Image: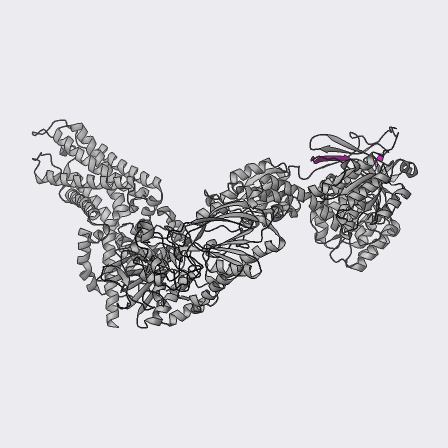
Amino acid sequence: MNELIEPDLFKSMREFGADEWQECYHCGNCTAICPLTEKNILFPRKPIKYMQMGLRKELEACVEPWLCYYCGECTEKCPRNANPGELMMTLRRYLTTAYDWTGYARKIYTSEKWEFISIGILATFVLVLFLLFHGPMTTILTSEGGVQLNVFAPSGIVHIGDMLMAATVSFFLISNIFNMYWKIVGRNRDLRIPPGLYIKEFKSLIFNFASQWKFNKCDGKSYWFLHWFLMSGYVILFILIVGFLGWFQTDEIHPWWHPQRLIGYYATAALLIGVGYFFYGRIKKSRERLKHSHISDWTFLVMLFLTALTGILVHFFRIGGLPMLTYYMYVAHLMILFPMIMIEVPFSKWSHLAYRPAAIYFSNIKEAALKQKQNHK
Amino acid sequence: MERQPSILVIDDEPVVCESCQRILSKEDFKVDTNTNPKEAYNQALLHNYDLVLLDLMMDEMDGIELLTALREEKPNLPVIIITGYPTKKSKQEATDLGVSDYIIKPFMPGELLDPVTHIIEHTEVVGKKELIGFREIIGLPKWERSEKHFMFYKEGWLQKGWDDSYRVGGQLPDLDGESILSITIPDVNSVIYRDAPLAEITLSNNTKRSIPSPVSGRIVEVNNELENDLPFIENNMYSKFWIGRVLPKDIEEDIKYSTTRNLLFFTGNTENKNHYYRQLIDLGYIVQQTSSIEELMNRIKEDQLRTVVLDAGSFPGEVPGYVKRLHKTFRDLKIIVFDRNDNDVAKKYRKNWLFSYCVPPLHAKEISGVLNKAFSNAGIEGIETKYETAFQPEVIDKIHITNRYNKRETAVYFLYDDEDEHAESIDMAELSSYADEIPGIGTIWHSHDFPVMDANVVAEQIRETHTKRIIIAGDSPGKVKDMFVRAMIISGNDPKDVLLAGFRDHGAIYQSDTERAKAILFCALYGLFYDEAIKPGENPVNADTLIIGGGIAGIQASLEIANSGNRVFLLEKSGTIGGHMATFDKTFPTLDCAACILTPKMVEVGQHPNIELMTMSEVVGVSGGPGNYKVTILRKARYVNLNKCTGCGICATKCPTNVPSEFDSGTTLRKAIYMPFPQAVPNKYMVDPAHCRYIQEGKCGVCVKACPVEDCINLDAKDETVEITVGNIILATGFKPFDASRIEDYGYGEYPNVVTSLEFERLVNASGPTGGRIKLRTRDKRGNWIFDPASDEPESIAIIHCVGSRDRNYNAFCSRVCCMYSLKLAHLVKEKLPDATVSEYYIDMRAFGKGYEEFYNRIKREGVHIVRGRPAKIEAVDGQLLVRSEDILNDTLIEDKVDMVVLAVGLEPGGDTDKLSKMLGVPTTEDGWFMEANNIFDPVNTRAGGITLAGVCQGPKDIPSTVAQASAAASRVLQNIVKQKVHKNVSDLSLKKIEENIQQLSNIKMVCYERVN
């Protein structure tokens, strides 16, 4: 198999993160200390080799970056201070841009201007839509004293918007996953994968997607738990606004123990606490993995936080009977939420929700196929 | 000159014509070229050219033919030959026809311009009959045929040449440290009168001096080399400080007013005769020399000489007597004596009888100063006539020559990488401001001033700043030299004027070397060798030597020195010599038994009459200086009388206290009274005061009772301090192994079967805990973990490389020997336990020496698994040790359970290094080893005078290298002892002194240069 070496590959890596990995002299300490490595899953040293050698295609076929949860032990143990942990993070950012066939991801990862302008454009888009099409901003309250939010923004219409958004996002994301598949598994012509294998391994995909169980091998359970907590909050809200917006965005004021409120509170709490925890960690730089932050890390956290914050404020203003504030806050909420989901999910950091389980899935498939091939010999 | 000078270039290669035209028209000459010789001949006849440039090898007509024909019509036309093929015959023919100069192709612009302008502006063609040899064509007429002596007229002098011209010059006595800023001299064809100023000299303190001309006449030639030769002038080197050649109007009249200077030189030493005699001749004096006092007195009487120089060195002790005789006989004789300055000698002279007392080594400047004083008293009376002179500075073109070293025409380019700068490197800002203050330096550039290293860009800068010389200063200045040379050529300067000041090459690496870097820069400015300038003075040396450290390095060095007949003090901290090598089992790659090759040397040291062995001793204070160090040594009490102890060992059998043995790296126990190992030298017992019950608590004393020799053990002995005086010190303090417990992940100290290489070495050795059998550590009855000969053998062993080395978290350097000794240990395991699995985990295999690569291959053949990859952590699993490592070459992960893990620990500088470093003034490098004078070509000397390094204390190395270095250190010491001199500390030289040295050397360099010519 001939492959062209790109001697300048390392230069393009610089924009995605620190480049101390050039110091690596391949002792293998990092691979040895990583709790997630197995006989044929060797990282973080192997990707460094590909990077140093300029083997772009091999690099893009790596699933290992998605298997790493950045506990940071490899960086602590490295005798050359080559920071392999950060390298894996850099690779995750790089692969996110590599899987994206539109090229847009690369733009926003390498240029802050592009990211902020994109956010600006999408937010303005939402604002303009509202300016043109919003319902009457009535100040008459409901019988329970709540604001008539659905007059201003009928949930039926917003729901359609949500579904369109979900569809677009899914389209891009799923196509990127296919791209990922192609790079990792598909281009390997001599490895024939029997279709049955796809189905067999599918359950591991679901399992990992839902639980992120491998996460807890690093660093103990608390990190895994907080992440899962955060994730659950987001998932719930996503399902609600895409599937059940009518029920969720109601003008009725239910009692506090009503599921509509409880679920909402839970999800918001999960988001705020989770994000707050990660944000604090990045500022304090208390652990190895929190010492290097890229602009994409910050934007993700900030946008998520603001979405949750504006959301809960909408809720309180609504039941508190403050119409104008409610309307403004609602618009703000959507202005943040829309660009966040449109950009982050298919093109930026949030894509890890798909890439990580997919990586495990593909790597399992590959492994099983290899084993089958060997057994047949 | 109103008319533009015109030149004809005749060469059949168009390229040559074009380049000549380009170069010459820059200087405002009118240039005609012709590639056809016949046409050119006609052209030359028709027009009036001031100069013809002629090629010799032309197809149509030979240059000599052309020249012959031309000479018939124009005998006085100046011709310069340019040719690429100078043959003796063609030169001879050309000179016979009379050419002014000879240029060889290919030539630099300067090589063409200089003779051309010279000829156009200054000289007449030299006729055929006056030429003597080839050299004369190129240079000025030689003055060898002239009368050697000068005739002096006040500060001027004249010398008769072999044609009718006279050379005139002057002298500048009593220049007290000032240098010459500029000289103004008249131009060619000026008329000069006797007593009128011939040259006006401006000194650096802005005073002016003038030199009166001894001759009246017309100046036909002027010394253009004055520009480069101002230092000669300062030294009164007359053959260089001639100002012009004059065709005198009335030489008979002029000579009446000048005098020759006659003196007698009295010496018996043939060497001195040549040296001072030549100098005196060069200064223009008529010198008669003799070696007999009677003849001297005769000559003085007969020739009525008034000045005599006595070289006292050739007649030791007798000259004061001669002076007395001379003074008694000739009352008004001026006596000048050259003699030493020490008190015993100087006292013997009655100074008031002497005109002057000079101390060799004497510079021409000094001699001329003294003699000038002696002769100037005998002055010429009464010449006061003032004549009109045509030499009026405002009217006539004059040549203004300034001192090269004071002109701000040198630029310094500092080459360094901003990214490489860190706190430890040389302070570039300080260097830059130092350079700024040196008078000769006009421009300073830094690396960032030229982001693009393009010769054209740099040439622009050179032209703008009027730079004539460039110094490139930095770690590797040669990198950019080519570019600067090109830039100099493009800008029209001499490409040879690019000088390098290499910091790293001269040992200026760290920030503490900034002063040294300044000195290097200053040297470069003067074009001198840095090593010459920093030669510190020398001290006499005491013949004794101190060697600190009794390992193989110390042993080797002490034997080398002692065998030459000189005395050595060998100091060792512990109770025995032998060092770490004595603890090894076998040595790589030959697998020699370490003790078998070491102990004979140890015994030789112990028995050598010239070696005074001091064990249990440490250096606590050093005073004095190179050649004469006074060292205070603390001799810790051994508590056992060295002379009486027979080494029987009965005391040890009775001693109740057990202590882990240092020699065995803690794998065995020794008693409180013990011999470190059975082959220790001295082969005597010693007491460990920290664990002896009597010394600590006052109880016991069993050993004393058991000892069969009376008064052998004295548990009340005290430490002593002694002082010794030595001339040289050799540091051979070795290393200490890296403490593996610093790396917690490897579990050293926690898991009993994780051992260091030194412990394993003892385990495998026949005098170790198990008699050489490899066994696992097990618990004994009291719960201690020990190596028991009866316990189980390990079935699998893992050896991990680079523990504490090549690791930026611990020691970033490579300890060099661990790869090889790990392979050796693997071999030993395979030898003793052939069925055991042995794996080596490495990063790079460093098999760097003679026979090492073959040894590596042998180990591989013996079935040792060599894995590229390093485990990061050792965990205890099911009573075994889990080793988890990436197997890089096989692209898989190894998770192996082994019985024993050996950590190949690295070498670190010993604990006393800092203390010794401060006491002796030997700095350490950033990784803690002692700093050598130069890493590449002088790893033995240090910057402190008389202190050398041997062995691992200078840097990790294997045994053959240690032994070699120890012999090298010994040879340095012996060199000093034989010379009876040792260099002082380099650090004793202040920057100011180095600058003075450089300026002095620069003068001497000029003198030597003149000698060669």
Quadrant assignment, res B387: top right
Q: Nearer the viewer, residue B330 or B222?
A: B330
Whether residue B588 is visible: no
Whether residue A4 is visible: yes
Q: Nearer the viewer, residue A373 or B173?
A: B173
x and y, in percent, of residue B936 in the image: 53, 54
Give the side of residue A291 with respect to residue B498, left or right: left
Quadrant assignment, res B651: bottom left
Quadrant for the N terminus of chain A in the image: bottom left
x and y, in percent, of residue B369 in the image: 76, 38
Residue at figure coordinates x 58%, y 40% from the top left? B991
Instruction: Please name the predominant secondary structure of the magenta segment in the image.
Output: loop
x and y, in percent, of residue B262 in the image: 85, 42
x and y, in percent, of residue B41 in the image: 82, 52
User: Relative to residue B927, is residue B215 depicted above or below?
Assistant: above
User: Relative to residue B784, is residue B487 depicted above or below?
Assistant: above
Does residue B181 show up magenta in the picture? yes
Residue at the top extreme, as displayed: A139
Residue at the front extreme, as displayed: B710
Q: Nearer the viewer, residue B956 or B276?
A: B276
Quadrant for the C terminus of chain A in the image: bottom left
Q: Nearer the viewer, residue B938 or B920?
A: B920
Give the side of residue A157 with respect to residue B546, left or right: left
Q: How many marks?
A: 0
User: Relative to residue B486, is residue B182 depicted above or below?
Assistant: above
- The boundaries of the magenta stretch are B174-196
Give the side of residue B44 with respect to residue A314, left or right: right
Does residue B206 show up magenta in the picture? no
